[in-house]
Every structure is written in C-alpha cells, then in structure tokens.
Amino acid sequence: EGYDSQKASYDLRANDVRSTFNGVIQLPGVIEAEDFDKGGNMSTFYDKDAVDQGNTGYRADNEGLDIITTGNGGYGVGNTMPNEWMEYTVNITEPGVYAYEATVSSIVAGSSFSIGLVNKDGTVTNLCKVTIPKTSNKNTYQVVTGTFGASLKAGEQILRFTINTALCNIDKVELK
C-alpha cells in the first residue's frame, strides 16, 4: 500500500551580512539616522511592522523601517515605536567623552531615544538619553544637546539608536 505525503512550503529569508550603508562613519562627525547599517530587520535594525510609512524610496533594504522626509530636503527616521532601533558602524578617531547635537522633532511631549554602544556579547551599554521637545509639527526640527555618560575607546564600533517612546523623528546626530 502507498504512503500519503504532504508537501510543506516555507518562505525563508536570510538576512544579509552586516555592511555599512555609505561606509564607516568617522567620529567625531555626523550620523544620518536613515543611513543605518545594511543587514536586515532584527540584524542591523528593528522595526515592529513591515510597512514603510515614510514611503520615500530612499532605501530598498529598509524592510518597513520608516524613512521620512525631514522638511529641509533631507531624510530621517520617523513614525517610530518603543523598542525599535537602528545600528551604525562607526570609527572613533578621537577617544573620550562625546557631546551630541541631535536634530529631532516630535508631535508629542516627552518623546525620547537612547544612544548606546553595542558590546561584543550583543549587550548594549547606554551612553545617553535624548529627550525631544514637542515641536509645532513633525517637520519642525530642533537641535537638542547633551553629553555621553561614558567614554568611547578608539577604533571601529557599533552604535545603536533605540526608541524609548513613540513618535521620535530623528534627522541626524552630530558627535563632537
């Protein structure tokens, strides 16, 4: 007698190997929020849904991470939800404690994100929390300043921007 067999079909997608989007970011310098590393969702960034609400066409590999226009002719990351994150490969050319200037906006009060250093074991050391003031609209950006709570060592490292509260719009962060 014969055997019945069933065929299973799966869609399997392997994330790409981590690579930079526009080369290693030299620090001191500017991190453009939309230029997070290539590699895929849950590898070099995390977005809770697969819908690109920004729909700018800036990147084809953003898998739903919401890249928006900033109102000043550039791009940024917006429509964010708590615990979403983006990672950036950086080269620290001058070790020490860095000051930041974050160009940001939010339509709600108390919005924030954190900047952290990704350790070799995958844990993240928090460097600072950036609190975003409520702006008149999502395209009205302000510069928020502060200082890291820890020193950075020289060399190539990975920084992570983690969204703490919804509706953070991040254009760029300059580290000095």
Image (cartoon, rainbow, N blue to C red):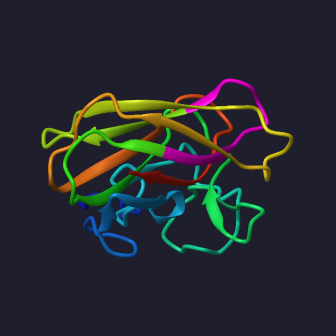
User: Is residue 15 in view from this perspective?
Assistant: no
Quadrant in the rendering for residue 54 = bottom right
Residue at the image point whose x is 64% and y is 65% from the top: 75
Judged left or right of residue 73, residue 114 is: left
Residue at the image point whose x is 39% and y is 61% from the top: 29
Please state, as top left, top right, bottom left or bottom right, where the N terminus lies in the image.
bottom left
* In magenta stretch: residue 108: yes
Quadrant in the rendering for residue 22 = bottom left
Which span of residues is magenta-colored?
Answer: 101-112
Q: Which percent across, then down, holds residue 156?
A: 18, 59
Quadrant in the rendering for residue 58 = bottom right
Q: Tell me if residue 36 comes above or below residue 109 in the rendering.
A: below
Q: Tell me if residue 12 comes above or below residue 124 in the rendering.
A: below
In depth, the one of 17 and 156 nearer the eye is: 156
In depth, the one of 150 and 47 nearer the eye is: 150
Residue at the image point whose x is 38% and y is 51% from the top: 176
In depth, the one of 50 and 58 nearer the eye is: 58
In depth, the one of 138 and 141 nearer the eye is: 141
* In magenta stretch: residue 79: no
- Residue extending furthest top? 110
User: Is residue 23 in view from this perspective?
Assistant: yes
Judged left or right of residue 110, residue 30 is: left
Q: Which percent across, then down, holds residue 63?
A: 52, 61
Q: Which percent across, then down, holds residue 3?
A: 26, 58
- Residue extending furthest right? 136
Count the marks: 0
Residue at the image point whose x is 76% and y is 30% from the top: 108
Q: Which percent across, then down, holds residue 24?
A: 29, 69
Judged left or right of residue 163, residue 57 is: right
